[in-house]
Image (cartoon, helix red, strand yellow):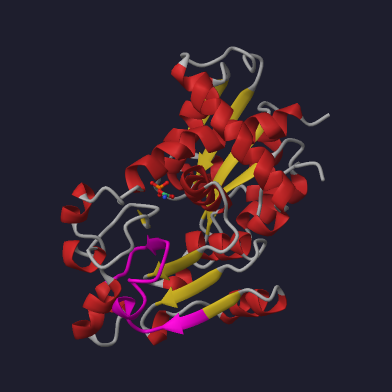
Amino acid sequence: MPLTHVVESQQFTVPLLQELFERSRRMERVVARGGTQDYRDRIMATLFYEPSTRTRLSFEAAMHRLGGQVLSTEQARAFSSEVSGEQLEDTIRIIGGIADAIVLRHTEQDGAARAAAVSPVPVINAGDGNGGQHPTQALLDLYTIWRERGALDGLSIAMVGELDRGRTVRSLAYLLSKYDRVKVYFVSPPEVQMQPDILEHLDRHATWYELQPDLHRVIAEIDVLYLTRIKPDRVRERASLARYTADAVTVGRMKGDAMILHPLPRTVELDPAVDRDPRARYFQQATNGLFVRMALLTMLFDEP
Ligand code: CP
């Protein structure tokens, strides 16, 4: 299936994911050699209506490492013609007429889909709305796991935090449902647990999951601890926050070959003392975003 836009994780098949992972591996070698000029005739535009450090800069670095050029609007809400009332669709038509790909972070859940519907060039969803998706984050998360384990079937993972609005965990759950014998623990206060649409999707794909109110109950049996941000003011019982946060003592109970991931930025849920643990992979995970985004851009640009 050709890749035209990247709007949601459900678009990816296992063979397409495998191709992306293998290309990402090759991109690691390309970067180690100082990059390539193979895509020097390409221009990528980044259009961000919300703040970003990792996603925008790694996409821009990816395009530079491929030899291409970048057009950037990092505060699109203030510095694009939306200020004058321009609709997203018109903005996308204009940018699509001057660039070869558009990376969009939007405030609305359907922002990327609306953009893709009118764009003459590939649109990549760099995160849309609260409770939308962030497919390229999930792709780099999965690449980070695949790169270390060599396989994704049989994975046991705990996704922890404020899951109802978590676009990274939503995108990752869709991807994991494509693999066999995966076990997903959603660890969250009940009031901010994973949304029913994701649970129904996992049911339809016969993916095992469990809703868990306490990380400590599952920490010893998982292969991947995937932490996400949690805002204390969204948790009814403040005293329960320790059930959704990780410090050196908590991760000390994990399996020796387990991994600790976080899409970052972090707040209270991940103690900086964990950074010294050899199983902490979140900084490597962020770096992997460069390779995966390079690979993704080449897959979009190479389409006939
Ligand atoms: N993980 C992530 O999306 O980070 P940014 O908000 O910095 O892009």
Question: In the visual, does 97 lie left or right of 269?
Answer: right
Residue 79 to residue 38: above or below: below
Residue 139 screen position, x and y as percent: 56, 48
Residue 34 screen position, x and y as percent: 46, 14
**Which quarter of the rendering shows the C terminus?**
top right
Count of marks, rendered view:
0
Q: Residue at x 25, y 87 (%)?
A: 237
Q: Residue at x 46, y 75 (%)?
A: 185
Determine if residue 78 is in view.
Answer: yes
293 drawn magenta: no
Question: In the visual, does 284 lie left or right of 21?
Answer: left
Using the image as rendered, state which of residue 29 and residue 43 is in the foreground.
29
Q: Residue at x 67, y 61 (%)?
A: 178
Determine if residue 53 is in view.
Answer: no
Question: In the visual, does 139 lie left or right of 222?
Answer: right
The stretch in magenta equals 210-231
Q: Quadrant of residue 153?
A: bottom right
225 drawn magenta: yes
Residue 159 screen position, x and y as percent: 43, 68
Q: Residue at x 58, y 19 (%)?
A: 68
**Which quarter of the rendering shows the N terminus?**
top right
Using the image as rendered, state which of residue 189 and residue 48 is in the foreground.
189
